[in-house]
Image (spheres, helix red, strand yellow):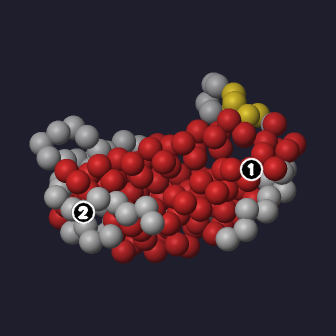
């Protein structure tokens, strides 16, 4: 996949984005639905919440160029909602379908963003950061969540996440 971008500042981020796109499916590969919601008697976010949060983040990444996007678990994740113990979360297949549908749109948004837009302010409800800083954090958070999914795989007795 090409890493051609409107600004060279986005090339590295786009490479990471592409890696994360692939690692998402690998992190969920072979995991039983029941294990997606196993918190191992901790307060940690389960794999179901982590996965939906990651999908929601990609929706937000694409929202400027593709407004109105939603995922199967929209109500569970909108407005940055935390884990809800009594909620029924989407299935792995639903999450994967949303990820596959939304990722090309998010990739397009990253590839076409201009330097002018990257330097403009994004209001985070009282705190302003630039779009460049927002994208930096977003790509970092994707890696962090995929790492958490990889850890959950091992904690739940599954094979390690394969990166090749």
**In the rendered image, which quarter is residue 75 located in?**
bottom left
Question: Residue 152: percent from the left, percent from the top?
Answer: 26, 51
Mark 1 closeness class: few <14, some 14–19, many ≥20 residues within 10 Å: many
Describe the element under mark 2 as helix, strand or loop. Answer: loop
**Residue 42 drawn above or below residue 147:** above
Q: Which residue lies furthest to the top in this view?
A: 126
In the foreground, 90 or 40? 40
Circle number at residue 159:
2
Question: Residue 139: percent from the left, percent from the top?
Answer: 58, 47
User: What residue is drawn where x is 63% and y is 69%?
Assistant: 104
Q: Is residue 76 visible?
A: no
Question: From the image, which quarter does the N terminus lie in?
Answer: bottom right
Q: Residue furthest left?
A: 41
Q: Which residue lies furthest to the front in this view?
A: 164
User: What residue is drawn where x is 55% and y is 73%?
Assistant: 101
Q: How far apart are marks 2 and 1 (CA)?
A: 33 Å
Mark 2 closeness class: few <14, some 14–19, many ≥20 residues within 10 Å: some
**In the rendered image, which quarter is residue 94 located in?**
bottom left
User: What residue is drawn where x is 26% and y is 57%?
Assistant: 153
Q: Is residue 156 left or right of residue 133?
A: left
In the foreground, 159 or 147? 159
In the foreground, 159 or 21? 159
Camera-nearest label, 2 or 1: 2
Q: In this view, does 13 lie to the left or right of 44?
A: right
Circle number at residue 10:
1
User: What residue is drawn where x is 57% and y is 44%?
Assistant: 138
Question: From the image, which quarter does the C terminus lie in?
Answer: bottom left
**Residue 87 drawn above or below residue 116:** below
Question: Residue 14: percent from the left, percent from the top?
Answer: 67, 56
**Residue 158 drawn above or below residue 94:** above
Describe the element under mark 1 as helix, strand or loop. Answer: helix
């Amino acid at each position: 996949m090409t890493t051609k971008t409107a600004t060279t500042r986005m090339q590295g981020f786009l490479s990471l984005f592409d890696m994360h796109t692939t690692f998402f499916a690998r992190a969920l590969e072979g995991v039983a639905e029941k294990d997606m919601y196993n918190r191992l008697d901790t307060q940690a976010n389960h794999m179901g919440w982590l996965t939906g949060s990651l999908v929601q983040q990609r929706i937000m990444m694409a929202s400027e160029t593709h407004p109105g996007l939603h995922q199967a678990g929209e109500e569970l994740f909108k407005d940055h909602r935390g884990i809800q113990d009594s909620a029924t979360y989407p299935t792995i297949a639903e999450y994967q379908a949303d990820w596959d549908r939304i990722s090309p749109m998010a990739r397009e948004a990253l590839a076409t963003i201009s330097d002018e837009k990257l330097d403009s302010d994004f209001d985070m409800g009282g705190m302003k950061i630039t779009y460049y800083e927002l994208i930096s954090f977003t790509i970092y958070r994707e890696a962090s969540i995929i790492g958490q999914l990889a850890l959950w795989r091992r904690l739940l007795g599954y094979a390690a996440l394969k990166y090749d």
